[in-house]
Image: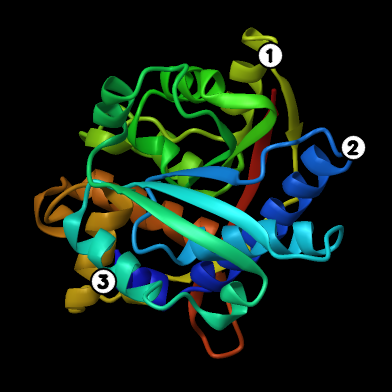
Amino acid sequence: MERLLEESTYTKTMTDFVEEVAFHVTTKITKDGLRSSPVFRVLGVGSGKGKADLRILTGIAKAFGASRTKKAAIHSVVVEPSAEMIEEFKTSVSPLPQSLAGVADVSFEWHEMTFQKFSECFPQKESLFDMIHFVASVYYMDAEIALSYCYQKLASGGAMFCTVVLEESFFPKMSRKLHNKVDLGSAQKIYTEVDLVNIARKNNWKYEKLWMAKYLYDITCCFDESSKEGSILLDFLTHQRDFRRTADQAFYNEVGDFLMEESSTNDNGRKLIEQEMTAVVLYK
């Protein structure tokens, strides 16, 4: 929900975070100089409009810049099912922003399809990648199946990372509150750092859980029953169309009480929810 994101600190926090993660991971997998390939290959899953991807590519380029005298060569493979979002992404890199063009030679490869379709079209041993990333996209698929496929597509010494919310942060709590009471659809499972660590351990993958980043959502309008935006936001938070109108009164009150308990009030009287995310990195 774009309006919610606009009225939160999510976008800036997330894009700053993924650039730092990409710098950290690239530095870690290249520090021993084991990579001999002239081109660093990256796979982005669910790249959307590309805001996070561009910051990730910048983080990679900066990591190379710290150890090289010439520009890094990066090839970015983008998997995104939305034609509209891919077009926006393409527009944003034509030309490539100077902040990235100044430090790297970047080429792109576009795949307008779901990750499931991509995995069916491209055998596991073809086109290995040095880095694979899932930024807020692992929720729309079975995580273990997706990560197992991608692990096979990692070059030796490569890494993939997923941004996820923390187990005890707002959205997992909200999901547990709604469980068995509404149809959560594609959001039936909100994967957290605990889930990804468990998957890594189960498959004997080397992993690392990184630092935490916090961002805020303004949910003040949820408490105004006359607010159209509040109704839309409630629908988003509960994954239920017309929640304010269709929920039975007891459950509606329960959700309202939960939102009140989980939110804090700032100096301007706005009701804010703090959400926490991290990244889990899998190394091959």
Along the viewing direction, whichever of 209 and 131 lies nearer the viewer: 131
Q: Amino acid at mark 3?
A: Gly
Q: Amino acid at mark 1?
A: Arg
Residue 78, x across and y down, in percent: 38, 48
Q: Which tag, 2 or 3, sits closer to the chain's start? A: 2
Query: Alpha carbon of mark 1 to alpha carbon of mark 3: how far?
Result: 41 Å
Which of labels 2 and 1 is toward the front?
2
Residue 44, position in %: x, y? 46, 46
Q: Is residue 48 above or below residue 199?
A: below
Disc 2 vs disc 3: which is toward the camera?
Answer: 2
From this viewpoint, is residue 68 visible?
yes
- Residue nearest the viewer, comparing 282 with 4: 282
The location of residue 112, given as percent across then percent down, is 23, 46
Dot 2 falls on a residue whose secondary structure is: loop
Q: Label 1: which residue?
A: 201
Q: Residues within 10 Å of mark 2 (few under 14, many from 20)?
A: few
